[in-house]
Image (cartoon, rainbow, N blue to C red):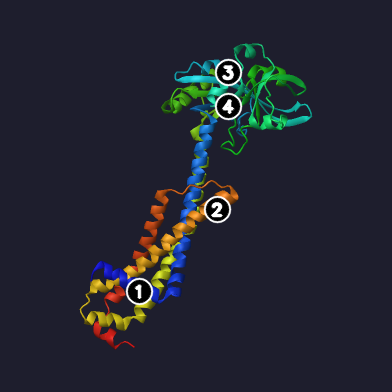
Amino acid sequence: MQFANTIQIAMRAIRRNKVRSALTMLGVIIGVASVIAMIALGSGARAAIDEQIQSQGTNIIYVSAGSWQRMGMPRGGAGSTTTLTLEDAAAVAQVPNVARMSPMQRSRAQVIYGNQNWSTSIEGGNEDYVVIRNWVIVSGQNFGSREIQTADKVCLLGETVYKTLFPGGEDPVGQVIRIKNMPFRVIGRLGPKGQGQFGQDQDDIILAPYTTVMKKLQGVTYINQISISAARPDVVEDVAVQVTRLMRSRHRISNPEEDDFSVRTLEEMAATRTEMANTMTMLLMSVASVSLLVGGIGIMNIMLVSVTERTKEIGLRMAVGARTRDILRQFLAEAVTLSVVGGSMGIALGVGVSQSLTQGLGWPTMVTSSSIGIAFAFAAAVGIFFGYYPARKAATLDPIEALRYE
C-alpha cells in the first residue's frame, strides 16, 4: 500500500466522523496552544530581563554598603551600614580592568518648579556615572570635575521628572528648580530608559554631583554605593572577585560571613529573576502538557472505538491481500493525522493568544520558530505514541474472526 493511499484512506475515515474527529482534536489543539503561549511568555520574560540589563549600563559591578553579620545579629541589607568611604572608591578605581568608577549617594526629596512639585530620587555621582549607565544626555551637558570639587548645586533631570515639572515641554536647561528648598540649576536632561529590572521607573530621577548630595542635601561623609564599569564583559567576574578581596583587606575582614559590604554584578542580580521566570515557565508548561496528555488519551480512545467499529472492514482488507504492516500504517496514519492537524490549529491559536496577551495585558511575549517546531513535533509524537496501540491491535486481528464480527 502506497503512502499516498494510506493518507487518503486516513483522511476519508476522519471526514466520515467529522464531529467526533473535531472533538478528538480539541484536546491536542488546547494543549499545543497552551505550550506555545507558555513558551512565548517565558521567552518574552527572558528577553525583557535582558533588555532591562542592557538599559542598566555596561559591564556594571555594584559595591554596596551592608550585608554583614556579627555576634549572632541578623545580616543587614545593602545600605544598612555606613562603611563605604570615598577612599574605598578611590582604591577600587585602581583595580586592574576597571574602566570607570563613580561614587554614589542616594537621597529622596521633594522637588519644586513653579506650581509643580514631585517627590523623586536624587542620585549623586561623578562625571562617569552617565557613561557607566549608558545614559544619553538629550539636552544640555553633564557636570564635570569642577562642579564635583565645589559641590555645585547643578543637576540633570530624568524623563519622568522633566515631564512632571515641565508639562509644557519647554527646555529645562538653565532653569532653576528647588530641591529641599535649595535652588539647583538644571544643566541637562537625560534620555528615557524605561522600567528597570526590578520594576522601578529608571527615569524618575535627578542626577547631581555626589559631593552636592553628601554635603548639601544629607550632611554625611560616607557613600551608599560604588558603581564600576569593567573594561570588557569577559572580565566582569574577575574584577568583582578582585574588588571583594580589596574591600576585605581595607576593612580588615578575614571572615566572609562578616562582610560589611556586598559586591554584585548585573548578571548575578538578574540571575534570580531569570531563574524564577524559567521555573514559572516550566510549571505552566507542565500544566499545559496535561492538556496534550488528555488529548493523546482521547485519540487512543477514539482509535480503539474505530478499530472495533471497522473490524469487519479490517478483515476484508486482510482477505484481499493487505499485510499486517499496511493495516498498522493505516490506523497509525489516522492517529498522526488527527494529532498533526490539531497541532497545526493549536499553533495558530497559541500565536493568537500570545499576541492577545501582549496587546491586551501588556505582557511581554516572544513566539520563536523553535517553540513552534517543538510544539509541532510534540503533537506528532502524541499521535504516534497514543496511536500505536490501537493500530497494533487492528493489525493483529485474525482475518477470519474479523470477517465473522458483527
- Residue 393 placement (x, y as % from top left): 31, 75
Which quarter of the figure is the C terminus placed in? bottom left
Label 2 SS: helix
303, above or below 91, in the image: below
Residue 319 location (% of width, % of height) = 22, 82
Neighbour tally class for label 3: few under 14, some 14-19, many 20 plus, Cα within 10 Å: some
Q: Which label sits in the foreground, 3 or 2?
A: 2
Between 146 and 275, the residue placed more toward the observer is 146
Which residue is outermost to the left? 321
Query: What mark, if any, has residue 127 been given in the picture?
Result: 3
Label 3, label 4: how many angstroms apart (C-alpha)? Answer: 19 Å
Write the residue at 57% across / 15% down: 87
Q: Which mark is residue 64?
A: 4
* Mark 3–mark 1 CB contact (< 8 Å): no
Mark before the other along the chain sequence, 3 or 4: 4
**CA distance for labels 3 and 1:** 75 Å
Identified at 61% across, 26% down, the residue is: 190
Q: Secondary structure at mark 4?
A: strand
Please report whichever mark, 1 or 4, sits nearer to the chain's N-terminal start. 1
State the residue position of label 2. 356
Mark 4 vs mark 2: which is more N-terminal? 4
